[in-house]
Image (cartoon, rainbow, N blue to C red):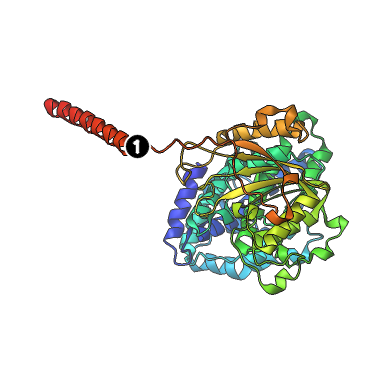
Amino acid sequence: MFEQTFKNIDDILHKDAGCGSELDYVEQTSWVLFLKYLDDLEKDKATAAELTGKSYTPIIDKEYQWNVWAAPKIATGGTEGDKTGKLDYHKALTGDDLSDFVNIKLFPYLKKFKTDAESADTIEYKIGEIFSELKNRIQSGYNLREVINRIDELHFRTHAEKHEMSHLYEDKIKNMGNAGRNGGEYYTPRPLIKTIVKVVAPEIGQKIYDGAVGSAGFLCEAFEYLKSSKPVSTLSTKDYETLQKSTFYGKEKKSLAYIIGTMNMILHGVEAPNIIHTNTLAENLADIQEKDRYDVVLANPPFGGKERAEVQQNFPIKTGETASLFLQHFIKILKAGGKAGVVIKNTFLSNTDNASVSLRKLLLENCNLHTVLDLPGGTFTGAGVKTVVLFFEKGSSTRKVWFYQLNLDRNLGKTNALSEKDLEEFVELQKKWASAGADPSVCPELETPNSWILDVRSLSGAEGYDLSAKNPNKKAESALRQPAEILEEMKALDKESAEILNSILKLI
């Protein structure tokens, strides 16, 4: 039901003059969806309060509640609480009346929540922050009425409904990434994120951070991983509170990505995500104190971005390359003993410019870069670059790096995406590498046709700390054949083709 509803909404928005792309479809669906989700959340909280004999004060004033302005229902039996579930078309706003209410009254009202909230870690603050960034782009009030009617059909009351909704929202983000000029900016493949989270293996009680949060895929998957890290019966009330309030942190520069990331986390079950709308790189590294640091960093910083000179002044290693600045930020903001999994362009491993060499030196000397996952082209739809994942721990220098080159027997693309099964061997071998304590003699099977170990002590400054993924275990290419041999094979194939064609003609 949810999937068909999303398709119908896209069809409606496609007709609207204010929505010109998949990005607009996701943004506009998001704010309506959020208000319906909020209405169901309020109902759940009211029910829970009633069961314990307490009263519940709604977050939203009556005039702005979903069942008043968006989907008033027909009352039966003469009582306000007895509803048929059918829309009351006499009370439901539409056309210009609906557009005026949303633009002139509803959005300004919701925007005020940010200044009125007690603190930034409340859902009230998030409501205000989201609607401070948004505006209604659906120009036709009649189209907006149709969208509202479709979303009113959705429910978020049960765990199964919330689970399905969060996955379908992920699909919309994926489609948005595929539609954009740079898919990797909006969507990191979920099988890759899940693999990175498994390798980093965060624990409840640790603070997890993504300074380039995007659609919050890393934080959402870390939340799912931590929820399933213990039997449900052993998760205490304190564990749940920790996961809700003091585990997940993120920063995002772009308004649309910020909104979608926040919405994505809320749909996954984190009511008030600690995501801030800010330019992470505008923060001076010298200002980061111990209290600002995190136990875990999970991130995929933007590919190929360029930063202005004044932003570069915040970093000891000056470079315009956005990803290189982010990597400096991540190293600095990790606690001693902290762990990270960061996606970066594979050229980082071998670039010979001064900034790249200095950054590799910084990483190898300040962190244990224990694992590098080399990904095939096409992993990020639309990004057009090859990438690697750097897994490192802060606090000790690197001695040996285990490389794994993901070689698949197919080309990756929009219709043939990366799967978790593709990464099973990597995860299995990486666990052995971790338990071997960087001692290859303990686990000789770590050297395979796809994997090898680099002793960093073999690198010298003259080589620029070159970490390029040169697989020494790759099978040698078969020798070039003689022209006569190739011609003979071509003759045999021509003969075989002629015989097949003759057999087909006899059947006609």
Q: Say above or below: 9 vs 1.
A: below
Which residue is identified by label 1?
482
The residue located at (15%, 28%) in the rendering is: 502
Q: Residue at x 69, y 63 (%)?
A: 354
Is any atom of residue 121 visible in this view? no
Tell me the element at label 1: loop
Q: How many numbered circles does the render carry? A: 1
Q: Dot 1: within a 10 Å radius of its alpha carbon, few (fewer than 14), some, or many (20 or more) residues?
A: few
Question: Taking 465 as reference, is 451 left or right?
Answer: left
Nearer to the camera, 485 or 320: 485
In percent of width and height, residue 498 lies at: 18, 31
Q: Is residue 320 above or below residue 452?
A: below
385 sits to left or right of 114 = left
Of 141 and 87, the residue lying toward us: 141
Q: Is residue 503 visible?
A: yes
* Residue closest to the eye, 146 or 445: 445
Q: Position of residue 285 (x, y in %)?
A: 79, 63
- Residue at the image point whose x is 64% and y is 39% from the top: 195
Where does residue 241 sit, x and y in percent of width and height?
80, 43
Residue lying farthest to the right in this orientation: 290
Quarter of the image where one finds residue 507: top left
**Which residue corresponds to the image point at 49% horizontal and 44% vertical from the top-left?**
3
The amino acid at mark 1 is Gln
